């Protein structure tokens, strides 16, 4: 069981989850509630999807992961699991910086017609989630794993509400998956029930509200 839950924790690490959200937006077929085809991200041109996936993969996964390893090798943090609240401060700031870069890249380098509100507000919602988590970290060590996976559930639910043909069953699958992720963190002793539920609530609420209301600038 320990091996199973450890695998779940690594497979659905917070650094990986945003790419899962983008993958769902790119690959899950929907029909827009308008006559403009690009109101459904599924219909974005293939080369655009590929370029976005690579660029955002570098800025939201590869760069943060490498930076974390460098911090670990230089003994700035004692564990990659960031077991203590105090160890999370600098990684929080660093990862938020990378997501701000990713957001600014899309905002100022991507064609206006391809700046879909769901995609833009999703990235903005992730930044807000990190900020909220950073503030709460001074009081409680909420589960970022749970916040990440439930954030994707909030994304998919909010996005599909703007589509005629949707894939709401994906939300149910993500919630089920989020349960396994949360259980893995508790089983491994990384978080208690309160920290796990708080992570689920923060991740889902912040990202859902961001995407549903198109919060971005």
Image (spheres, rainbow, N blue to C red):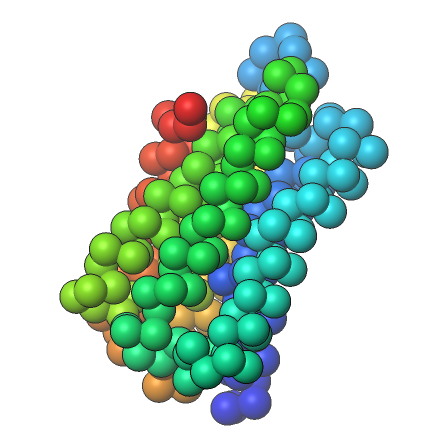
Q: Nearer the viewer, residue 34 or 125?
A: 125
- Inspect this view and state whether residue 208 appears: yes
Please say if 194 is above or below 216: below
Q: In the image, residue 56 lies at what x, y percent?
A: 64, 45
Can residue 201 be seen in the rendering of this structure? no
| Relative to 202, 152 lies left or right | right
Question: Which quadrant, please, contains the C terminus?
Answer: top left
Q: At 81% across and 33% down in the image, what residue appears?
A: 46
Query: In the rendered view, would you say 196 is above or below 80?
Result: above
Q: Name the residue at 76% across, 39% down.
A: 51
Q: Position of residue 155 (x, y in %)?
A: 47, 41
| Horizontal and vertical percent position of residue 69 | 56, 74
The residue positioned 34% from the left and 74% from the top of the image is 87
Q: Say which of 72 and 123 sits in front.
A: 72
| Residue reaching furthest to the top | 35
Q: From the viewer's side, name the closer residue of 182 and 74.
A: 74
């Amino acid at each position: 069981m320990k091996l199973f839950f450890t695998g779940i924790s690594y497979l659905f690490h917070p650094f990986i989850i945003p790419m899962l959200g983008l993958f769902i937006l790119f690959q899950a077929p929907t029909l827009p509630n308008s006559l403009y085809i690009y109101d459904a991200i599924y219909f974005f041109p293939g080369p655009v999807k590929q370029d976005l996936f690579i660029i955002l993969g570098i800025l939201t996964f590869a760069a943060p992961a490498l930076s974390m390893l460098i911090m670990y090798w230089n003994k700035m943090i004692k564990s990659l699991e960031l077991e203590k609240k105090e160890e999370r401060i600098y990684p929080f700031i660093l990862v938020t910086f990378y997501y701000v870069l990713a957001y600014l890249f899309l905002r100022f380098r991507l064609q206006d017609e391809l700046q879909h509100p769901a995609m833009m507000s999703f990235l903005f919602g992730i930044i807000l989630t990190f900020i909220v988590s950073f503030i709460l970290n001074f009081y409680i060590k909420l589960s970022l794993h749970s916040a990440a996976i439930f954030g994707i559930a909030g994304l998919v639910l909010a996005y599909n509400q703007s589509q005629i043909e949707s894939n709401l069953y994906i939300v149910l699958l993500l919630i089920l998956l989020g349960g396994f992720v949360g259980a893995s963190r508790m089983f491994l002793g990384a978080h208690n029930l309160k920290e796990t539920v708080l992570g689920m609530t923060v991740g889902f609420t912040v990202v859902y509200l961001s995407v549903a209301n198109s919060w971005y600038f």
